[in-house]
Amino acid sequence: MSGIITVTAPVNIAVIKYWGKRDEDLILPLNDSVSATLDTNVMCAKTSVCARPDINENEIWLNKLKEPFNNKRLQNCLGEIKGIARAQKSVDEEFLSWNVRIYSENNFPTAAGLASSAAGYACLVTALAKLYKVKTDISALARLGSGSACRSVYGGFVRWHAGVKPDGSDSVATQIVNSLHWPEMRVLVLVVADTKKHTSSSKGMQCSVATSELLKYRVQNSVPKRVNDICKAIKDKNFATFAEITMKDSNQFHAVCLDTYPPCVYMRDVSHKIVEVMHKYNEICGQTKVAYTFDAGPNACLYLLEKDVPEVIALIKKVFPTTKQDFVKGLPESLEGFPEIPDFDFLNLFPIQPFNKDLLKYLIYTKVGDGPQEIADGSHLLNVNGNPIN
Amino acid sequence: MSGIITVTAPVNIAVIKYWGKRDEDLILPLNDSVSATLDTNVMCAKTSVCARPDINENEIWLNKLKEPFNNKRLQNCLGEIKGIARAQKSVDEEFLSWNVRIYSENNFPTAAGLASSAAGYACLVTALAKLYKVKTDISALARLGSGSACRSVYGGFVRWHAGVKPDGSDSVATQIVNSLHWPEMRVLVLVVADTKKHTSSSKGMQCSVATSELLKYRVQNSVPKRVNDICKAIKDKNFATFAEITMKDSNQFHAVCLDTYPPCVYMRDVSHKIVEVMHKYNEICGQTKVAYTFDAGPNACLYLLEKDVPEVIALIKKVFPTTKQDFVKGLPESLEGFPEIPDFDFLNLFPIQPFNKDLLKYLIYTKVGDGPQEIADGSHLLNVNGNPIN
């Protein structure tokens, strides 16, 4: 027993967006949000933790770089877990007095703006909760690190309840359905070529809460109905309804960002081109086959069913021509075993001409997956002495 | 007496936006809007009209091209004016039986998306009202041609009242202050290099009314307060308040467009860059010296005071470098007679690096001006025989 705990945790992509806090310290949101958890085999955070008597101070490495430990959110997470452990007497006082080492990395570029902090904090608190053997709602712990991280502690489709209590005890995530419920659901992440620094979502939402009149309406009127409707659509596996709500909520979230003063602008010309192409595609198909959603950055996430993946990837390659050999990453894009023969003829008639080359950097093909998992094969990121293996 | 009437009419730029109709046929808006009328010496529509017994059918030329006359809005305008003339007996029945010739042109590119239809219809109805000698509210006539045209029938700052009556008789424009009230006010129109076709504002607003939840809130809550506040700011010549409301209302209008399904996107990356630069400039100045506003297209209109024009034009040339010799059009950009020596040193420290060359096509420097004017010098666009002179 090395005493090292290693966990992987997934990214999640919201279909009903979290934007705006009712409590900055406890990270309590103004509205419920809903997301899908993505397969950790394609994208994940991986974190190893240990506590040892021979470590002089708490230390953390993120993607191979040592970071300062005096981050308030990190301290909150560790402090909360140790407090619970003490109350539950789940480990002894001596163990609680030891310092910790944390080594965390993502298997995807952090800079891609792919909710890396959500996966990272879900991973961290899961690992620490196991280290200190606490029995508690992991989602509430993850929320203290990064709001949307609470949705990454479950697989499948997940709802983060805003809650109403001032202490935040009812602001937790619950699973709507697990990852096996809608096995045909697929996700394409379109990473755009964009180097501009955006306003952090934390600052952006603070500014929206302070200045956007439309945010109030969204929180009180639009979101509650959408959350109910999309939860039902997910349970019923009603793709058209799921997709329409997803697109409308993404659009409304970015509308609120634009209504903020000064405005927060996350989508770029290329993002809007993706939107236009997907609406045109759905229109030509005579049914809603694909939904887009954008977080606080220019990258698109597309939700679609497995049977339509070859057609949509072909469409993307046609309209957003690429010079890159390894443009499609993630799951194999093989056509074998697809229940329908995709229609590639429509591409020649598609009414939007190809844009400039390489507007997209790459495409990640993935699916809905499970929540955090402890790694049992011993492939830790810390060695038996608690030192980073890299 | 040639019997030819020739009128010039101005463009107007809204600071509280018109977006959404409560009646499509009568062109009645969901909310009040406010605009400034721009100097016809810089940008204007010019229209000549005549009625003659020897004309076989009604004919119209727009910017040298003959257009079909069976345009519903055009027919509505002519029909309404003739109806009033008949009721008022302002001309005899024989004159009313003659067909008309209309020749209209803009002295600025129609494609620039600079509210050319507003100037055009304000010009047309003013000319026809004079031709038929009717005494009536010209703004209500202009509204039948193009909603925002009703604001171009007065100079200075103008308010279009939504009205509440089903027949639209109270949906008229009134002058808030005339063009002499705030003589320091200046406008810079930044025409961006963009060839993409946008959704027409008529279609866009129909779609917003049908699908945007946020539009309802805007109309009921945001706009009424803003209209009152900006009218007061205009009367008080309070630039900072005027500017802040102008920017917030532009942002909210584009937020509503984005909340529309499918979304209407009028601003481009370059538009958002202009927004970012102007916020940064105001921040560095420690006061609000410039306001941006965007209509249903990517071009920016900046409101600012005369004393700040040299500094802001220098800033624009620095951050949006141009290769064009005649980049600044309109009023002379001479520094002579400016009350303050502009500070060009700040340009070297400006924290936003220059963007790519020629993102802007040109800049039109103009000011607040008067309403439509009949041309008395005989420079008609139709000759004595009623034929186009070109």
Image (cartoon, coloured by chain):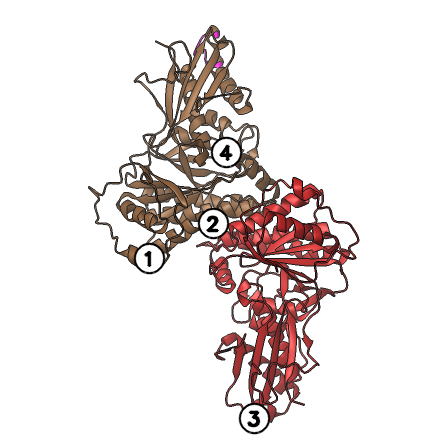
Chain colours: A red, B brown
Which chain is indicated by disc 1?
A: B
Q: Nearer the viewer, mark 1 or mark 4?
A: 1
Residue topped by disc 2: B269
Q: Position of residue B140 (x, y in %)?
A: 47, 26
- Residue indicated by mark 4: B163
Tell us which disc is closer to us: 3 or 4. Answer: 3
Residue A374 lies in the magenta stretch: no
How many residues crowd around disc 2 within 10 Å: few (fewer than 14), some, or many (20 or more)? some
Q: Report crowding for label 4: few under 14, some 14 to 19, many 20 or more residues within 10 A (C-alpha).
A: some
- Cα distance, mark 2 to mark 3? 54 Å
Can the viewer see residue A201 in this picture?
Answer: yes
Q: Do tags 2 and 3 sit on the same chain?
A: no
In this view, the residue in front, B206 or A339, is: A339
Q: Which mark is residue B350?
A: 1
Q: Dot 1, how many residues are within 10 Å of its Cα: few (below 14), some (14-19), or many (20+)?
A: some
Quarter holding residue A14: bottom right
SS at mark 1?
loop
- Amino acid type, residue under disc 4 in the picture: Gly
| Tag 1: amino acid | Phe
Mark 3 closeness class: few <14, some 14–19, many ≥20 residues within 10 Å = few
Q: Which residues are magenta?
A: B87-93
Q: Are marks 1 and 4 in contact (CB under 8 Å)?
A: no
Badge 1 or badge 4: first in the primary sequence: 4
> Label 3 marks which chain's residue?
A
- In the foreground, A329 or B109: A329
- Of A366 and B240, nearer the camera is A366
Mark 3 = which residue? A53
